[in-house]
Structures are given as C-alpha cells and as structure tokens.
Image (spheres, rainbow, N blue to C red):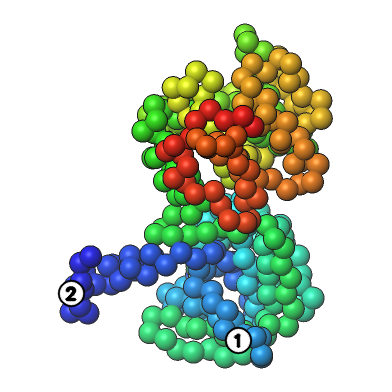
Amino acid sequence: MAEDSAENHDAPRRLRQAFGSFATGVTVVTAHDADGAPIGFTANSFTSVSLDPPLLLVCLAKSSGNLTSFSQAQRFAVNILKDTQRDVSARFASRVEDRFSNTDWHSGPEGTPVLDGTVAWFECVTDNLVDAGDHVILIGRITNFDHSDARPLAYLRGHYLDLGIAETAAEQVSHHGGVRVGCVLDCLGKVLLQRTTEGWTLPFGKTCAGFREARAELEKTLAAQNVNAEIGALYSVFEAPNGNATWMIFQGDLHSFSQGEELQLFDPDALPLAEIDARQLRAALRRYASEARQSRFGLYVDDAHSSGNVTQVEARPTPWTRFITGQEGQQ
Ligand SMILES: Cc1cc2nc3c(=O)[nH]c(=O)nc-3n(C[C@H](O)[C@H](O)[C@H](O)COP(=O)(O)O)c2cc1C
C-alpha cells in the first residue's frame, strides 16, 4: 500500500481513490427549487446519523449547479436506489437539464419529490447546513420514510458492485474451461425462450475464456435479435452439459423484442420442458417457475459435494469459491 501526504500534488486524486474503497449504496437526493421545479443529484455520501431525533446527512459539492437551491430548500428527500436503477443513478449524475422528465416520481407526504421503485426513501426537513471544505453537509430531520426488502444498488471504486461480484466469480470459473452467459428474461410474468435445431433454450452468448467477453457476447446476441433487456442479478451457475465450460444465467427484465419463429414468450407454468435438451436448464426453469409464483428468487450454485445449493439472495450469498470446485449438479 503506497502512503501519501497532503503535500503530494497527486494527493487529491489518490485520496478520492482511497475514499472509493469504501463500498456504499447509491442515493438520489431530491428537492424543489425556488420556482417549484423538482431538482436532484446522485449521491453516495449518504449516512444515517441519529435515531432520536431521526437525522441523516448527505454531502453536496460546492461546485454543484444545485448548491444554492439545496442550501435554500426547506425540505429534501433521500431516495436509496434499487439494483436495477443504474440508469437513474447515471441520469442524476449527468448534465441532463431536466432529470425528472424520464424518471417516474411522485410527491411525498410533505410534497417533496420522491422517486418510484426505490429500496427506501426519507423525506426530511432541512435541519442544518454545515460548511465542510469543498462540500456542504446537508443534515435532514426525517419526517416520513418507507422501505422494502428489494436489493439495493451498490457502488465501489467507481463501479456498481453487483457486476463486480459476478466478475470476480467469473474470473475464478474461467480457469475451468470457459464461460457461457445466458439469461432468463421476464416480460409481464412470461419468460423468453429461443428456438434452436435441438428444441428450445434460453438466450445465450458464445462460450468465451472470461466473463467479461462472455457477457459482451450475450449482449451482442441479444442486440442482433432486437432484444432490448436489462440484465440483473446472477441466477444460476453450473457446469455445461458437455462439462467443458461454466454456464452463468442471469435474471433480467425484457423491454421489447421482435416476435417471430425463433423467440417466444412462455408462461412459466407452461414451458416446453420436454423440448429443452439440457437437464440443468430444465431444472433452472422449473425452479424459476416455482419461484416466480412467490416472486422470491434465489441463486443456485452447483457444488462438488452435494446436489447444489439455492441461496436466498438477500440472505447470506453463496461463497464465490464454490465456482472453482463446482461440478455438474443435480438441481
Ligand atoms: C455513484 C455517484 C455518487 C455520487 N455522490 C455524490 C455526492 O455524495 N455528493 C455530490 O455532491 N456529488 C456526488 N456525485 C456527483 C453528482 O451526482 C454530480 O456531480 C452532479 O449531479 C452534477 O450535476 P450538478 O452540478 O447539476 O449537481 C455522485 C455521482 C455518482 C455517479
């Protein structure tokens, strides 16, 4: 580890990097400006401060175009983003003029803009502003809040964390002979399957040496078929039927695709299982159908010593080391 002193001209950059090694969630802080227009910015400097009285804080850069508006706002809200809201994080960190026109939001109980579909939100009265170097600390007294047990978006070293974990896992599995990435895409409760000469399968990319390339291959395949989807959490990891690669299946939301002979949506309870060649895929889809009924999904990782484990993802995640020793499992 390289040490640094404040005199070092490179210190601010290195300090920013060092701060970045603290994993955080991602929030969007919202308020109304003096004209009543909704304003907001992405922030990971959110911290819970006190239960009694209920206080939180967030740091706003003095360079922000929103500094005056937030300093003068009587109220503001902190919205904790869900793992599928990377686009919202990017929009509220960008130079887009009206960040709200493409964002679903509503007014909170006290009238503050509250974003839809987040993990949690806190509506606050501005309690105090603390001048702190190149930032202002906004301290809010919470008047209303709500939360769900959806998975939050996480951020570490300038990257969203969910993918980072998958990449680490994939770097390990790639020693195993290659990685092939596929996806279970949901559209209004139905699952997208692809027809091949052997029957039906999930959309897959080609087998590659590493996860990054394999994921890019899947994205390329989807794009070539006009499939517009958002890929989310890892769902299932197991040995390929021929044993020479690891298959990683992600969950995702299907926004649009061109209906045709090759791609079709199926009700999870009416999947053409008899026409799905790979036993592991049949098992993954059977599990998906049963989990979809409860809207609660787990991560399956096969294991050298047992028939494979399903872990509720909100609970303790399956250790990634399993990827190294995994063998063909019996789901
Ligand atoms: C993940 C992430 C976290 C951020 N955290 C903060 C923060 O805590 N405070 C801050 O002032 N800016 C933060 N930013 C940057 C602001 O979102 C961005 O500079 C701001 O929205 C720029 O627009 P503005 O000048 O109109 O405010 C963050 C950006 C990202 C992508």
Quadrant position of the N terminus in the picture: bottom left
- In front of the other: 253 or 312: 312
Image quarter where the C terminus lies is: top right
Write down the residue under mark 1.
Answer: 50
Give coordinates of residue 162: x percent, y percent: 52, 51
For mark 2, what is the residue?
8
Describe residue 74's horizontal placement relative to residue 137 as left or right.
right
Amino acid beneath label 1: Ser
Q: In this view of the protein, which residue sits in the foreground, 6 or 176?
A: 176
Q: Quadrant of residue 38?
A: bottom right
Pair 1/2: label in front: 1
Q: Is residue 135 visible?
A: yes
Residue nearer the viewer, 176 or 89: 176
Q: Is residue 256 left or right of residue 181?
A: right
Farthest residue to the front: give it: 305
Inspect the image, locate mark 2, and give the three-letter code of the amino acid beneath it.
Answer: Asn
Q: Is residue 112 above or below residue 267?
A: below
State the SS at label 1. strand
The residue at 62%/56% (across/down) is: 315
Q: Report whether residue 257 is seen.
A: no
Task: Report whether 61 appears left or right of 17.
Answer: right
Query: Quick check: 241 above or below 17?
Result: above
Q: Residue 43 location in percent, x, y?
A: 52, 68
